[in-house]
Image (cartoon, rainbow, N blue to C red):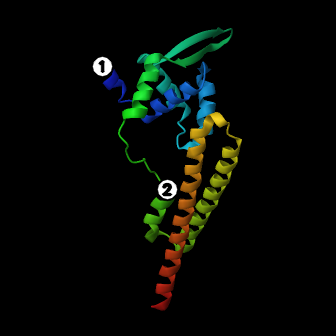
Amino acid sequence: MADDRRESALPSTAYAVLGLLTMTGEVTGYELRKWAMNMRYFYWSPAQSQLYLELRRLRDRALVYERTEAQPGRPDKRYYTITDTGRRVFRDWLDHSEVGPPLLKHSVALRLFFGHQTSHSRLREVLTQYAEWARRQQQELSALKGDMLPALRYSSIVADWGVGYFAAEINAVESALASLDAMDSEVGES
């Protein structure tokens, strides 16, 4: 039981790797990375180096099994599968971990926060570019949702969540632009 508590202290990326391994058979780190890149819409996409770091951490804790296949003239190919212990730890995380706030790093909101150091026209450009990007994300998510297999119905729910998230971001941008316009009107009146 002490080992389970220690294992439950894994970072979110480790749980995401375990989760991906529950959806696949035996895969290489490279194949897992390709899957992770497709998850960019689902709010998790690690750096390649972090993915391999997590695979090693999970292997060292016996949560994944690593099989090595020799390749003549090339580095050995490593295949990974989730172990029964890994499934149990992943399921425990799904069922019992506390719900916490998302980690938000929003460069556009940060730039707006420090807007007193730039012009309103530049802030409008940044906000407009961000809104255009968010609209593209909505469109791509909607298209991706249409391509999902029935077996990925939970991912489809998250895709809907993403479409709503980006709609909220677009609304926030429109509100910020209106606030900038109001500030410009106030300055013009004085």
* Dot in front, 2 or 1: 1
81 to the left or right of 116: right
Which amino acid, by three-letter code, is at mark 2? Ser
Which amino acid, by three-letter code, is at mark 1? Met
Residue 99 visible in this rendered orientation of the protein: yes
Secondary structure of the residue carrying numbered label 2: helix
186 to the left or right of 143: left
Q: For the residues marked 2 and 1, what is the alpha-carbon distance in whole angstroms? A: 42 Å
Secondary structure of the residue carrying numbered label 1: loop
Residue at 63%, 38% in the rendered image: 38
Q: Mark 1 = which residue?
A: 1
Q: State which tag comes first along the sequence, 2 or 1.
A: 1
Residue at 62%, 36% in the rendered image: 152
Q: Mark 2 = which residue?
A: 107
The correct choice, above or below, for 126 with respect to 23 in the image is below
The correct choice, above or below, for 39 with respect to 128 in the image is above
Q: Position of residue 151 (x, y in %)?
A: 63, 33
Could you tell me which quadrant the C terminus lies in? bottom left
Q: Which of these two is toward me, 85 or 78?
A: 85
